[in-house]
Image (cartoon, rainbow, N blue to C red):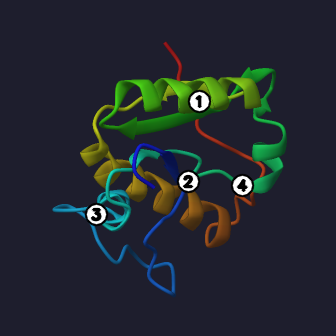
Amino acid sequence: MSGKILIDGLNPLLPDLSGLEVGNTTSASEMVAGWAKGAKVVKALNRIGFPVMANPAINGKPVVMFYCGDDAAAKETVARLARELGFDARDAGPLTQARVLEPLALLWISLAMKQGYGTHWGFQVAK
């Protein structure tokens, strides 16, 4: 994996979706980076349902896809891919920011699965 871009779309969920296996002091992405020595790990594509993944716009506005990582060129490659898929790609910073992106995914999952939102929705950035 050395030198390769690895997109981490994992979420370290507890089996009952009540929380995360890891967080605050590390993230699944940081663990992946430790296992895939030399890989350029970028956290992305981890918090969206299939219907929106297939068509990432709601009411004509693209859904945001946050990404984070420690290699600028790898992040730009992932951002370009996200934009080509139709997302509003937004840089969330270094890989340690996966510690906040993974809980954001948990929020999406819990709203989708436990609160009845379903899977055809996503977050958007309004300015």
Q: Report the mark closest to the observer, 4 or 3.
A: 3
What's the amino acid at mark 4?
Answer: Gly
Say which residue appears at 37% left-offset and 32% top-offset: 92
Q: Is residue 114 left or right of residue 91?
A: right
Element on which disc 3 rests: helix
- At label 4, counting other C-alpha atoms closer than 10 Å, the crowd grade (few under 14, some 14-19, many 20 or more) is some
Measured in 3D between alpha carbons, the distance from the residue under mark 2 to the one under mark 1, in whole angstroms, is 15 Å
Find residue 50 and report its image quarter.
bottom right
Give amino acid for label 2.
Asn
N-terminal-most mark, 2 or 3: 3
* Residue 34 image label: 3
x, y percent for residue 97:
29, 44
Which amino acid, by three-letter code, is at mark 3? Gly
Q: Quadrant of the N terminus?
A: bottom left
Tell me the residue that label 4 is attached to. Answer: 49
Instruction: Mark 2: give few (<14), some (14-19) or many (20+) Cα within 10 Å.
Output: many
Cα–Cα span, label 2 and label 3: 19 Å
The residue at the far bottom in this view is 15
Question: Residue 27: x percent and y percent?
Answer: 30, 61
Q: Nearer the viewer, mark 1 or mark 3?
A: 3
**Numbered badge on residue 124:** 1
Looking at marks 2 and 1 on the same chain, the residue that comes earlier in the sequence is marked by: 2
Image height of 111 relative to 66, above or below? below
> CA–CA distance between discs 2 and 4?
9 Å
Disc 1 to disc 4, C-alpha distance: 14 Å
How far, Cα to Cα, is label 4 from label 3?
27 Å
The residue sitting at 55% across, 53% down in the picture is: 46
